[in-house]
Image (spheres, rainbow, N blue to C red):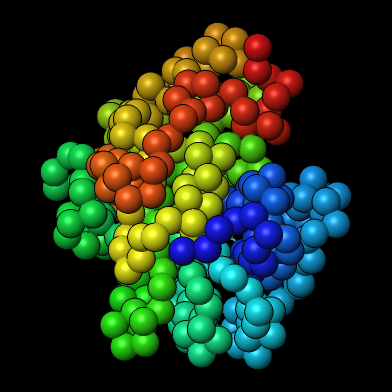
Amino acid sequence: MTQIEGSKFLVIGGAGFIGSHIVDQLIDGDAAQITVLDNFVRGKRSNLDPALASGRVEVVEGSILDQELVRRLMDGCDGAFHLAALWLYECVHEPRKALEHNVVGTYNVVETAQELGLPKLVYSSSASVYGNARTVPMTEEHPFDNRSMYGATKIAGEQFLRAFHDQHGLEYVALRYMNVYGPRMDDKGVYVSVIVKVLDRIARGERPTIHGDGTQAFDFVHVSDVARCNLLAMAAPASDAAYNVGTGVQTSIRELVDELLEITGSELEPEYLPGAHMFVTNRLGSTEAAERDLGFHAQIPWRQGLRTVARHEALLR
Ligand SMILES: NC(=O)c1ccc[n+]([C@@H]2O[C@H](COP(=O)([O-])OP(=O)(O)OC[C@H]3O[C@@H](n4cnc5c(N)ncnc54)[C@H](O)[C@@H]3O)[C@@H](O)[C@H]2O)c1
């Protein structure tokens, strides 16, 4: 349990999409000092521009594979947020790299936290650990039915934390995010979210494509809610537990595309293509445990939140 105000934090992967929003909220919460460690494989310096203006943020370029560096930066911190990871499809195409960064890198972070007696570590896990929902909504007791390398690495991270808690008393919370969206979503390269792909096609005047019948359904949670949940997890007495982070509302891909067409004022019709392989087609997490133990309740409904996807502001009414 670490209060935000006046405390010193390390945000690992803090130049990325979610991490940079955590940094912003730490500044707003009057944290004394924030160090960002990021190797910039995906994150951007510009994501930190608003926070850097505070004078309380230091950015260090480097990797969690460099344990000495992690140790130096974590030493003296009151808490750390660990978000550094390779993304779902990178893990598919480069499984060994996923093993190094997501598994060995995470082990370095966990071991260092224990060695230094870090008061609290908040770990970004993922709802991917569950695979497809067997029952809806999935509670945190839902089995690990993951079928992806990415999910495997997230399970490994959670298990390291549990082991270090039992063996050494490491205080931690793991957060299993549903599908996160919002300003600063990565919009470059092949590993981008469905929301970015659809908006890109609309911007080019091309029909958005839907693979399969569009009934695949997910819980889309806004990045500012996810960042807020990270701060709540840091400050709560909760430890040695994993929590779903979502809205508790399920949205199908068809509904999502229709809404994006609506808010961009587009007359285009979606184009249905044969189903592509997806690891998960049905995801909805129970929000009860996070509400009970962390006091977290998502505040931004997805229809409203979609309007904040900044890069496409010009398209939005
Ligand atoms: N975005 C989502 O929908 C979602 C859903 C579930 C879980 N998550 C998890 O949340 C975390 C943050 O996700 P995000 O969407 O902000 O991704 P992101 O890629 O924007 O952020 C991750 C950051 O980590 C950095 N990084 C990667 N490898 C590193 C290394 N070895 N050393 C130092 N930095 C490294 C990247 O440059 C990037 O800035 C990740 O762990 C991700 O798996 C995200």
Give the residue displayed 14% in from the left and 47% down from the top. 134
Q: Is 256 left or right of 138, judged from the image as shown?
A: right
- Image region (quadrant) for ligand 1: bottom right
**Rendering coords of residue 51 (x, y %):** 77, 50
Give the residue displayed 49% in from the left and 70% down from the top. 120
The answer, for residue 16, to whether it is visible in the render is no
Residue farthest left in this picture: 135
Tell how many labels.
0
Depicted 252 relative to depicted 144: above or below: above
**Rendering coords of residue 275 (x, y %):** 32, 39
The answer, for residue 45, to whether it is visible in the render is yes
Q: Is 247 left or right of 79, judged from the image as shown?
A: left
**Rendering coords of residue 59 (x, y %):** 78, 66
Q: Looking at the rendering, in which quadrant would you find the C terminus?
A: top right
Depicted 9 relative to depicted 17: above or below: below
Q: Which of 238 and 281 is in front in this view?
A: 238
**Rendering coords of residue 32 (x, y %):** 73, 60
Q: Nearer the viewer, residue 211 or 65?
A: 65
Q: Is 292 left or right of 58, judged from the image as shown?
A: left
Q: Which of 192 and 296 is in front in this view?
A: 296
Q: Is 312 left or right of 142, judged from the image as shown?
A: right
Depicted 244 relative to depicted 211: above or below: below
Give the residue displayed 78% in from the left and 61% down from the top. 57
